[in-house]
Amino acid sequence: MFNGWDTDVIIEDLKIAILWNGKWHYEKCNKKHSMKQVQNRDKIKIKEIKKCGYFLYIIKDLKGKNDEFVVEEFSKFLIFLGLVWRKSLNNSEYIGFSDKERMGIRKRILK
């Protein structure tokens, strides 16, 4: 989809690509695991996704199998999704969110 690179989830109508990155993207997991290679591949993938005009939403999952974390991240994504949807409808600012929430969402959108 993205010049040979994939994502975990694609929402084509809203041009959103989601990456659910596990700890191997951020920590050395075994002797053969190359952090440099993983991070270089991630940079290329991110560049290609953005070149295709998609919003990129990355979930940094260092907890492994954790139901509470999944629920928390899904809640954050729904907030993000609502903002993208509202912004695309009327190109307005982020209505109905605290300053702290707006800053967090803007950081994710601008990554």
Image (cartoon, rainbow, N blue to C red):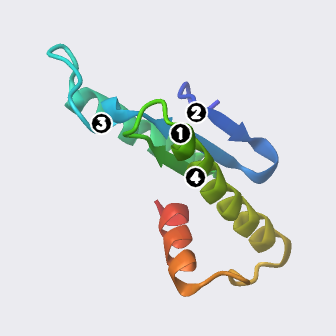
Q: Which residue is mark 3?
A: 39
Name the N-terminal-most of marks 4 and 2: 2
Classify 10 Å Cα crowding around label 1: few (below 14), some (14-19), many (20 and above). Answer: some
> Extreme left residue here?
31
Q: Amino acid at mark 3?
A: Gln
Q: Say which quadrant the N terminus sits in.
A: top right
Q: Residue at x 57, y 52 (%)?
A: 72
Q: Using the image as rendered, state which of residue 109 and residue 66 is in the foreground.
A: 66
Classify 10 Å Cα crowding around label 4: few (below 14), some (14-19), many (20 and above). Answer: few
Q: Which residue is mark 4?
A: 72
Q: Using the image as rendered, state which of residue 3 and residue 41 is in the foreground.
A: 41
Name the N-terminal-most of marks 1 and 3: 1
Query: Foreground mark, 4 or 3?
Result: 4
Q: Amino acid at mark 4?
A: Glu
Instruction: Assign a secondary structure to mark 3.
Output: helix
Where residue 3 sits, quadrant-wise, is top right
Marks 1 and 3, Cα distance to the nearest angstrom? 13 Å
In the image: residue 100, left or right of residue 75: left
Q: Are marks 1 and 3 in contact (CB under 8 Å)?
A: no
Q: Residue at x 30, y 36 (%)?
A: 39
Name the N-terminal-most of marks 1 and 2: 2
Query: Foreground mark, 1 or 4?
Result: 4
Q: Which residue is mark 2?
A: 7
Q: Residue at x 32, y 29 (%)?
A: 24
Marks 1 and 4, Cα distance to the nearest angstrom? 16 Å
Instruction: Assign a secondary structure to mark 1.
Output: strand
Q: Are marks 1 and 2 in contact (CB under 8 Å)?
A: yes
Marks 2 and 3, Cα distance to the nearest angstrom? 15 Å
Looking at the rendered structure, which numbered label has been put on residue 19? Answer: 1
